[in-house]
Amino acid sequence: MDEIRTSGARALALPRPAFAIARPRLRRAALVTGALGAVTAALFLATLSVGSAYIPLPDVLRSLSGVGSNPGLDFLVLDLQLPVALSAVLAGGAFGLAGAIFQRLLQNPLAAPDLIGISYGASAAAVFAILILNLTGLAISGAALIGALAGAGLIYALAWRGGISGYRLILIGIGVSQFLLGVVLYLTARAELHDAREAMHWLVGSAGRADWTEMYVLAGGLCLLVPVAWALMRSLRALELGDDAARALGARVETVRLGLIAVGVTLVALATAVAGPLSFVGLVAWPVARRLLGSGEGGVLAVSFVGAIIVLTADLISQQLLPVALPTGVVTGAVGAPYLLWLLATMNRGGIRG
Amino acid sequence: MAFAATLRGRGLAAGLVALAALLALLCVASIAVGSRSIDFATVVSTLTGEGGGTDTETAVINDIRVPRTLLGLLVGAALGLAGTLLQGVTRNPLADPGIMGLSAGASAFVVLGVALLDIRQLTAYVWLAFAGTAAAAVLVYAIASMGRDGPTPVKLALAGAAVAAGMWSLTTGVVMSDLDALNEMRFWQVGSLAGRNFPVLEQVAPFILVGVALALACGRSLNALALGDESARALGQRVTLTRVGILAAVTILCGAATAACGPIVFLGLLVPHMARAICGPDYRWILPYSVVLAPIVLLAADVIGRFVMSPGELEVGVVLGVVGAPFFVALVRYRDLAEL
């Protein structure tokens, strides 16, 4: 009961008759989503303007719109910085949304894509491609994409037993990821040091290395999958009541579940192909978004924005503030951790379900 | 294994004895098998102190294989118990020293020691890894204690994940900018029993023995905690104190084990599930079963690792991943393991 006294915003989450809460909640969700979108846009422009050289904002906008720009600045903005900023936004958004899907679907705050094994398929395939097949560039991304999908398919097939249970899927995901981790450790411990470093670089993940082909594919995927995710997440509310109750309410439990898993896996696979397995984004984006929204509903756009903000911030820090330029993935952990600490510090009883 | 779920009391005790016998056999195998083939009679006579082998053979057995096997026993028991305690205290079947950030803490400290202090000996890594594990554990607990209702299982799990990610960032940050550190790290990181002699064993053995004793005393408390904090309190448990005690035991066990062999994380996840599959939800049985099962798995993996690539060998961390994981998957598939 002491929640009532804490703040007006938190009081919104109290059970009141549906007609009374629907509108303030919607308004708050819209406000939060809008604000997150604005922050994302600001960080996006900041990334364009402070890349390898400082370019004033008006010039950035001129280059972007193509009106009255100069070719030298165009090269810096469009060819050097735009891919970095775009891949940060797209990959961050995809990891964030995928994390939200898995955490809500499996009802476990630890069910992030990198913990339940989907990223490891990509990692093992990419390390194999780098160290054994000596591939470079786009071919590594292709291998990662195939590896992620194959790994996820294997996990799903092994976890299927007349249906999918949350814990079984997670545990088998961890089992499969330990197998793949064994492969990665074996390959890197036996490779030439220089190659091992390159593989390590890939394993850490970085925003600044994608090429346009991979990004077009990811952007297309997001346009297609975000609406699907939005539609399926609505049915998820029924699923969270338990399978039997959900069926009684008319939800098609297995269809929704399979659909959401497919969407989440595809997002992770595409994003990993672009930026590598950026750790922590999928884990932290959803708890933060949920906290900001004040309720566990909706939030498909909000969580994507949070993911994008984390990766953009991490990239700015790794490129601008650190003495040595490090790959983005080194910093996502360091940026994500304080978010999570803040979340823990302010968490109320029952704020997050286990 | 379906029949096993019905075992109770005397059956469980008999099962424990049978597993202990299997473990003894594995110990013998671990001493008898290796890149240098020594015939079994010589092994037995060397162990009983009668001599009979050449000097090299005696040295191989006494100075390499015996400490390695003893270390496997201790480290296995430590990691199995640490995983069981962590899963019990966080009430999360996913918790293990890897996911909870403890191994990541050890890795981060070792890599910092290599990069900043230029440390290169295994015996020095022991203390670094120990300090790293302890630092991570304290950090996880302190973070989880923030906020109104103290360290709940969910907050412990989240804090563990946060610390793991933070420590991992630190490790990769150092490794990416220091090639030397990367070179040391990629071998230490795999987790191996090879090359650890008596000095390492002597360093970690007292810690592990204390930790095992502490852990085995926790059965009743873990049973109470499994019912939820409120019920545990109603049963007279001092919940916060119990939790601190259990986490201290985990730190000692996991710190010593990681210090000796590098982060062999999967064992702490696998063994509690195996134990629970055999003896159900009662921690007074799960804990002793973990003590016996974990070294069985670790030594078996180590012996396999010496076989498959003979005359070279495969690190036990790799074998555990590649052979242990399919076993784990089968276990999860054919039993429902979510009861916690």
Image (tube, rainbow, N blue to C red):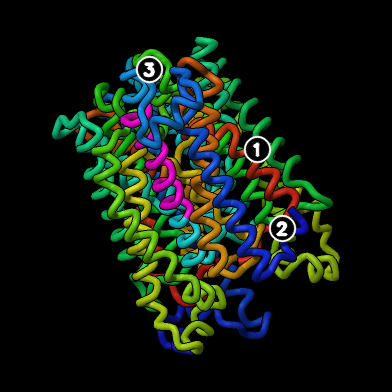
* Residue under numbered circle 1: B326
* Residue under numbered circle 2: B336
Amino acid type for the residue under numbered disc 2: Asp
Whether tag 3 and tag 2 are in contact, CB under 8 A, the answer is: no
Q: Looking at the picture, do discs 2 and 1 lie on one chain?
A: yes
Q: Quadrant of the C terminus of chain B?
A: bottom right
Q: In this view, does A298 lie to the left or right of A311?
A: right
In percent of width and height, residue A284 lies at 46, 53
Residue B240 versus residue A100 in the image, above or below: below
Residue shown at 77% from the left, 56% from the top: B2
Q: Residue A75 carries which label?
A: 3
Quadrant location of residue B187? top left
Q: Looking at the picture, do discs 3 and 1 lie on one chain?
A: no
In percent of width and height, residue B327 lies at 65, 41
Q: How many labels does the image show?
A: 3
Residue shown at 58% from the left, 45% from the top: B22
In percent of width and height, residue A241 lies at 72, 70
Q: Residue furthest top?
A: A134
Q: Looking at the picture, do discs 3 and 2 lie on one chain?
A: no
